[in-house]
Image: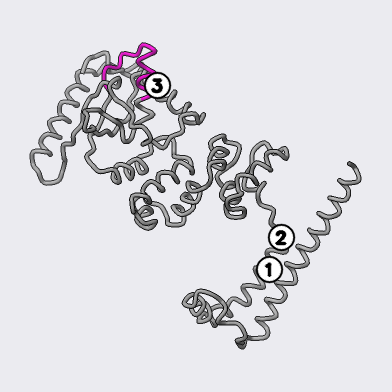
Amino acid sequence: MSEANVHSPQGEVDNTIEVEEAVKGGVMLLRGLVSRKDGSAKKVDSYEINPRIIEEEEGFNLRNYNDPDVIAQIEDLAQSYMAGAFVPPIIFRTTADGKIVPIDGHQRVRAAKIAIERGAPLPFISGVYFNGNNVERTKLMLRAEKGLKYKPLEQGIGYLRLYRMKLTVEEIAKDVGRSTTHVETMLMLANADADVHELLLSGKVSAEAALAAIRKYGENAGQALKAKLNGGVERVTAKVMDTSPRLPKKVATSVVTHFRQAASLFTEHADLRRHVEQAGSTAALRGQTVSVDAEKFYALMQAHDEIVKATSAKGGKDAKATKAAAKKD
């Protein structure tokens, strides 16, 4: 280690020699641990690679390089390389025709090349070799995101890639450390039509709004989202798409109280739920009756009445507002 690579804090005595001795001691310690072969330490296939010879595998990376966040992240990494700061190693593999391609670290490779173009003395970057099949490589890419997290659509496309490799939703969720609900939701985005994808990539529509539109309009989700944008909305969010009536806080609190008073009814008749789940529909229950506690049933009636009253009042206000707006026009 050269003295130029060690910077002492201002006002302190230069301790370059001590640092060099400490590093040597650390290296010897690691070598000793590896030689013991008792699991204390393990040597991996780490390499220093010329970033100029690293090529991206077309279609593998999930990043959208036109995304302003991705552009900013690459610029930050380029600045780090130019400043000589530590940047984590990439993870790469070699192809049958001898190419070196990244599995994790695409942004770092691009940043390194930018730094070189700007005159940075960067002959090599660190890399760790990975040996695995296409399924394992995709899993690694999804798990190894560093710094900038994948956008929902990018995640969904990654999960869809694994799903098409015959992995189940449960297996994908376990491999990436997320819930099955999360994976299913992201798959819904990935399977949406191209017009929805275009709106998401443009940043004019949030993932939550796209999901709300997909659930409500299906194949017509893109048209519904565009209609919101054409109506003067700058960016479509979940709140814009949510047209369901909202209960005032006071009413909602009261409704919850009434439901809690009647909650035991649902456990007392849990066999109904199991029956429907086994049958696959509620048709088998048609015409049947159950006996319930009158006081608890009345609590449900009160909850129902408050919901109807609150939503009817809101509907009346909305109708008046619409008429008033029409008169102004």
Question: What residue type is disc 1 on?
Answer: Val
Seen in the image, is 319 located left or right of residue 17? right
Q: Earlier in the sequence, mark 1 or mark 3?
A: 3
Element under label 2? Answer: loop
Question: In the rendered image, which quarter is residue 86 located in?
Answer: top left
**What range of the chain is rendered magenta?**
110-124
Q: CA separation, marks 3 and 2?
A: 51 Å
C-beta proximity under 8 Å, tags 1 and 2: yes
Relative to 48, say whether 148 is above or below: below
Residue tagged 3: 78
Marking on residue 255? 1
Image location (x, y in percent) of residue 256:
65, 68
Relative to 55, say whether 287 is above or below: below
C-beta proximity under 8 Å, tags 3 and 2: no
Residue that sits furthest to the right in the current view: 327
Nearest to the observer: residue 296 or residue 139: 139
Image location (x, y in percent) of residue 30:
15, 35
